[in-house]
Amino acid sequence: MKEVMEASHAIAEAVKAVDPAVIAAYPITPQTHIVERLSEYVANGELKGEYINAESEFAAISACLGAQATGVRSYTSTSSQGLALMHEILYIVSGMRLPVGMTVVNRALSAPINIWNDHQDSISERDSGWIQLYVETAQEAYDMTLMQYKICEDKRVLLPSMVCLDGFTLSHVYEPVDILEKARVDGFLPKYKPVHAVLDPKEPLTQGPIGFPTHYMEFRKDLVDAIAGSERVIGEVMAEYSRMFPVSIKDSRPDRYYHYEEYMMEDADVVLVAMGSVCGTIKEVIDELRGKGVKAGLLKLVTYRPFPNELIAKRLSGYRKVAVVDKALSPGNTAPLYTEVASALYDSKERPNLRSFIVGLGGRDVTLGHIERIINMTLKGEGAKTEWMF
Amino acid sequence: MAILGLDEKEYFARGHRACAGCGESLALRLLMKVAGPNVVVCHCTGCMEVVSTPYPETAWEVPWVHSAFENNSAVASGVERALKHLGKEDTKVLVLGGDGGTYDIGLQCLSGAFERGHNITYVCTDNEAYMNTGIQRSGATPFGASTTTSPAGKVSNGKHEGKKDLMHILAAHGSPYLATASVGYHTDFLRKVKTALETKGPTFVNVMVPCVPGWRIEPEATIKVAKLGVETGATPLYEIIAGKHKLNMPVDSSKLKPVEEYLKMQGRFRHLFKPEPKTAELQAIQQGVKDGIDRLKKLSDLGL
């Protein structure tokens, strides 16, 4: 079913198809349209799952933890301060290896309070042990929501996952989306059968015990190995999804999903690295500049956790000029995505000249002019190592 | 031989690492005989979680989950709805926490779960301070008790504030069954746990459990102190059934022992007696106990 719809509603459609037994959420702008639509589905009987109106995001993620530990599929969604409020429990959900699914509608963190988009909220949770996947379009948001469950429930993974989409800039934007029939989704994502420990009186197990110094490091090593290993599973699931569901709406998504998407990289003199909806703006500028003989390209990163270090190093190695576009900060250090790309390239023999650009914090418009300046400054080697596009 | 009709099986098994004379672990052992085996236990962070689950060992013979200090009622909300979805509504959801996790840091989650009306039974093992971290003051610590963060000193007589009235906070949520109990009166305690588990909706039992290091008592004095708490009225035993109070003291509430007998046994109140008796404070405590009992009796007698 092809329909022009809001990205938030596309996600709600995907969640309905995933059919979680328990949805627990707390409303926060700009996530609200997702949870309102899910509430309607429950009220109309279209969704048979239990909807818990949690009294905070902290309670919402805790309820998901409890539901998942009981052996059912769960879902939550949040933004910004809500994700920050979940912080403590995020680490516990991954530590307990519970494959909870979440949508993060990216929004800036206070102070000053700001309801508009940047990536500071989810980037700040990069060490929480959750898989993080960033999307550019409504179709990608829909597809990735189906894929995230297949990925995180895989017994080689058993980790929670976040699909991250830009607040307002994508969440509230209407785009054409191909919504799959339920039977086709079921063919991709079977009914939930937990392969982790569950709370069952017939088989009593203790979940969430205290780990003394004699065991704690082993638990953490297992987690690190699992998320590193998930890179392979993510690639497999993306390939399977792309095979089962070919593109039906032009330019709504990549032909084949992968950890990253390349755009005009082949002969590029300068490559931008970015995540999320800003990639649409970057693609437009690239098209325009190509007409003027400027050869720019884009590496759109989808998988941010696990960070595909080797793939990125391999793909960027050999380019002379690369600009990393961040929508988040790490006060006291260089911008997060820049730092990680630089780290990935450290062992490369042919390291590019790497530049860092800060854009779009707190919903500041990222204009075509900003992107053109980033490309020109990088090509000419102008400006400081880190430049802010105000 | 089964005593008092109790299950002989231990669902909270021996071998855990609680202190000798621990009132809290005794309460758990007893209440699990009523709650087990068709139950899921959700436990707050605290002494009991630490002493009972040192990985890879566990004292729990029922499914048990712990995740954090303050989120337990929310975890239980998820467990309860998941069990409902799975058609396992006969499995009870028992939520356990100390007074820190219940009265203070977990109060918002507790309120949320009670407002939503989940079918859960919450038992607060109340020892009137944060014992796990070394006897710090909580909202359940009574007036005058010396803790490591409300120490008695030259210009202070311990905690300056009274105990939070959690029972009536929860009563305001419309809970169908609330009760206070004491580990010193275990048949009364277990009857209340059983009633709570059998009552549909969010139910609550607050059980007073003396803490040997926290109250600075001898290990063999746990039950004696717990009993004295009731006999002096410092630990009033009552239920609030569908909003109506029912005082059920095992002793005549008009012939209660002086509260000093209860206080004197505990090191946490020693500064009220030595070097010289703090008469004003002791009178205030006695008056507070009397007022509390009188009020409960009135509500109970009037069927309110």
Image: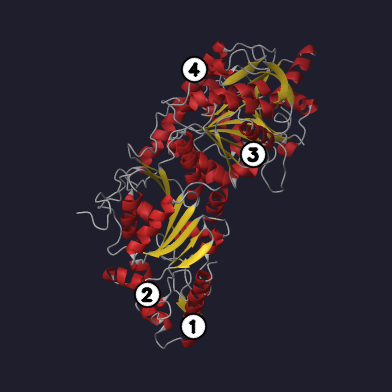
Is the residue at mark 2 from the same chain as the one at mark 1?
yes
**Res B281 label:** 1
Q: Does dot 4 land on a helix, a strand or a loop? A: helix
Q: Label 1 is placed on what type of residue?
A: Glu
Callout 4 crowding tier (Cα within 10 Å): few <14, some 14–19, many ≥20: some
Q: Is residue A339 left or right of residue B53?
A: right
* Residue A189 spot, x, y in % from top left: 51, 20
**Res A79 label:** 3
Is the residue at mark 2 from the same chain as the one at mark 3?
no
Q: Is residue A355 left or right of residue A238?
A: right
Q: How far is disc 4 from disc 2 in space, using C-alphas?
A: 70 Å
**Residue at the (64%, 31%) spot, across then down:** A44
Decide which of B207, A219 is in the foreground and name it.
B207
Q: Does dot 1 land on a helix, a strand or a loop? A: helix
What chain letter is assigned to the residue under label 1?
A: B
Q: Does dot 3 land on a helix, a strand or a loop? A: loop
Residue at image mark 2? B251
Residue at image mark 4? A236
Decide which of B27, B107 is in the foreground and name it.
B27
Q: How far is disc 2 from disc 1 in space, using C-alphas?
A: 25 Å
Q: How far is disc 2 from disc 3 in space, using C-alphas?
A: 55 Å
Position of the N terminus of chain B, as image quadrant, is: bottom left
Q: Earlier in the sequence, mark 2 or mark 1?
A: 2
What chain letter is assigned to the residue under label 2?
A: B
Q: Label 4 is placed on what type of residue?
A: Glu
Which of the 4 image quarters holds residue A158? top left
Judged by depth in the image, the label closer to the viewer, 1 or 3, is 1
Q: Is residue B26 left or right of residue A389?
A: left
**Residue at the (60%, 11%) spot, across then down:** A246
Judged by depth in the image, the label closer to the viewer, 2 or 3, is 2
Is the residue at mark 4 from the same chain as the one at mark 2?
no
